């Protein structure tokens, strides 16, 4: 079958995005990228992907708008409460044995997972000796993570998740509500470094004891998945932990042999001592 | 459209899904040639047992779809709870965590649109019982790409809204009872 014109346009658009701004979506899973680009085309009122490409090449303001579509992520605090329960019960006891701990939330988006980790570590008395790195490629999402403000109507779900995860405090201790928003306490950000980092093009930047990267790899093709997993492997200290999304796994990866299951059903792995 | 050989089947269902699928999936023979992708609306916080449930009833293989899994014929893949299921051009599956569409994740529209894109005229799409509008837009995309569009007869459906919406959006869809759909799917693999 000859390649569809639309697919050629998408390839060219992603190539333009890479060559002009060094954002590399060329090895993302194509079905999702296409869906998101169609939304962008529809909502921004362009007649074709080629028209988006032209605008993108000549108008830097288009970059942020397009990235908003390509990297949009919806998360919840303590999403999959059983994952956080497993971190609390199975991973935290190991981390306690270190005098200082580094945690990397890779692809942190607007910060819901980051705050979940900081609150969990505070409850477990580990926050003061931990440094959290929260990274994403989307500057707008990072800025949102750094403000820590969420719609108040999401708090009920966050609170329920927190409770199910084995939370030892009340979520309401950590935010103040006003004007339909919940604003999370700035003390939660004292031990956090926010940074622009790409799993596609950037390298290792520190030695970690725990990497949590959930529902990011599903957007990558197998080649890119392997690159990211290699990055996590190289970042982790010996016996460091890696947490993935509920539907992600190391099974098909070249790096599977460097890890062992820690909590299999929660996709928490531990790097081997070699 | 006729004469183009069928390559894959997509099915979407919501309220009343288990009963409806129980008429269709167990009727497919063990040597069925086509892959079948199924989206059923399930609550996000419940571990889905649909695949296990149907594996016990079916002659074809039934499993919950895994990310980047290569597609095999004669297998029914259920979308996992709280993830969209999409078909990639290289005939593998991918999952996504994108926002819910019409309050649904997994979404029938998302599966149908991505499958229509990959299989075009080779796709057979079925909208079954359900109490919302999901699947209507997707069925239209399948028909527009030259695929075969089918809706369950609303009068016989446990919840008629979903097939009704699909027929409204896609007036040329074949409207069939559950038994007729089962027979159609058995015959279409031979085309």
Image: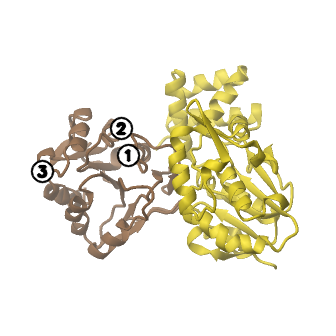
Chain colours: A yellow, B brown
What kind of element bears circle 3?
A: helix
The tag earlier along the polypeptide, 1 or 3, is 1
The tag earlier along the polypeptide, 1 or 2, is 1
Q: Residues within 10 Å of mark 2 (few under 14, many from 20)?
A: many
Q: Are the residues under badges 1 and 2 in a single subunit? A: yes
Q: Which mark is residue A169?
A: none
Q: Position of residue B101 (x, y in %)?
A: 42, 41
**Image quadrant of residue A249?**
bottom right
Rounded to the nearest angstrom, the CA distance separating label 1 from label 3 is: 23 Å
- The residue beneath circle 3 is B156
Rounded to the nearest angstrom, the CA distance separating label 1 from label 2 is: 7 Å
Residue B78, above or below A180 = below
Q: Position of residue A14 (x, y in %)?
A: 65, 36
Between marks 2 and 3 in the image, the one whose residue lies nearer the viewer: 3
Answer left or right for A19 relative to B69. right
- The residue beneath circle 2 is B141
Q: Which mark is residue B112?
A: 1
């Amino acid at each position: 079958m000859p390649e569809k014109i639309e697919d050629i346009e998408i390839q060219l658009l992603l190539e333009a995005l890479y060559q002009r701004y060094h954002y590399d979506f060329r090895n993302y899973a194509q079905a999702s990228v296409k869906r998101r680009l169609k939304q962008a085309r529809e909502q921004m009122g362009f007649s074709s992907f080629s028209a988006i490409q032209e605008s993108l090449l000549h108008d830097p303001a288009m970059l942020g708008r397009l990235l908003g579509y390509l990297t949009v992520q919806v998360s919840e605090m303590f999403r999959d409460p059983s994952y956080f329960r497993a971190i609390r019960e199975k991973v935290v006891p190991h981390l306690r044995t270190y005098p200082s701990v580094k945690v990397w939330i890779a692809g942190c988006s607007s910060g819901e997972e980051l705050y979940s980790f900081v609150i969990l570590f505070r409850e477990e008395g580990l926050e003061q000796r931990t440094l959290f790195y929260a990274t994403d490629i989307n500057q707008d999402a990072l800025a949102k993570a750094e403000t820590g403000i969420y719609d108040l109507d999401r708090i009920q779900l966050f609170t329920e998740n927190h409770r199910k995860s084995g939370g030892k405090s009340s979520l309401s201790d950590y935010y103040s509500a006003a004007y339909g928003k919940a604003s999370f306490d700035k003390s939660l950000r004292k031990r956090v470094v926010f940074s622009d980092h790409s799993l596609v093009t950037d390298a290792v930047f520190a030695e970690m004891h725990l990497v949590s990267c959930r529902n990011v790899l599903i957007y990558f093709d197998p080649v890119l998945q392997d690159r990211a997993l290699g990055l996590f492997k190289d970042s982790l200290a010996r016996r460091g932990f890696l947490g993935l999304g509920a539907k992600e796994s190391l099974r098909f990866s070249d790096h599977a042999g460097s890890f062992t299951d820690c909590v299999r059903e929660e996709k928490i792995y531990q790097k081997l001592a070699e | 459209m006729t004469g183009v050989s069928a390559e894959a089947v997509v099915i979407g269902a919501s309220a009343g899904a288990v009963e409806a699928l129980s008429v269709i999936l167990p009727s497919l023979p063990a040597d069925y040639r086509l892959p079948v992708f199924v989206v059923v609306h399930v609550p996000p916080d419940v571990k889905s047992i649909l695949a296990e449930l149907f594996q016990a009833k079916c002659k074809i293989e039934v499993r919950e779809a895994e990310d980047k899994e290569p597609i095999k014929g004669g297998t029914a893949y259920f979308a996992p709870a709280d993830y969209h299921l999409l078909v990639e051009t290289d005939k593998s599956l991918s999952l996504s965590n994108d926002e819910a569409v019409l309050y649904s994740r997994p979404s029938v529209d998302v599966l149908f649109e991505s499958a229509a894109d990959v299989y075009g005229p080779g796709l057979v799409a079925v909208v079954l019982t359900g109490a919302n509008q999901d699947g209507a837009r997707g069925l239209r995309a399948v028909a527009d790409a030259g695929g075969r569009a089918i809706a369950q007869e609303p009068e016989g459906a446990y919840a008629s809204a979903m097939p009704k919406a699909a027929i409204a959006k896609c007036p040329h869809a074949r409207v069939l009872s559950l038994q007729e759909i089962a027979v159609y799917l058995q015959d279409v693999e031979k085309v």
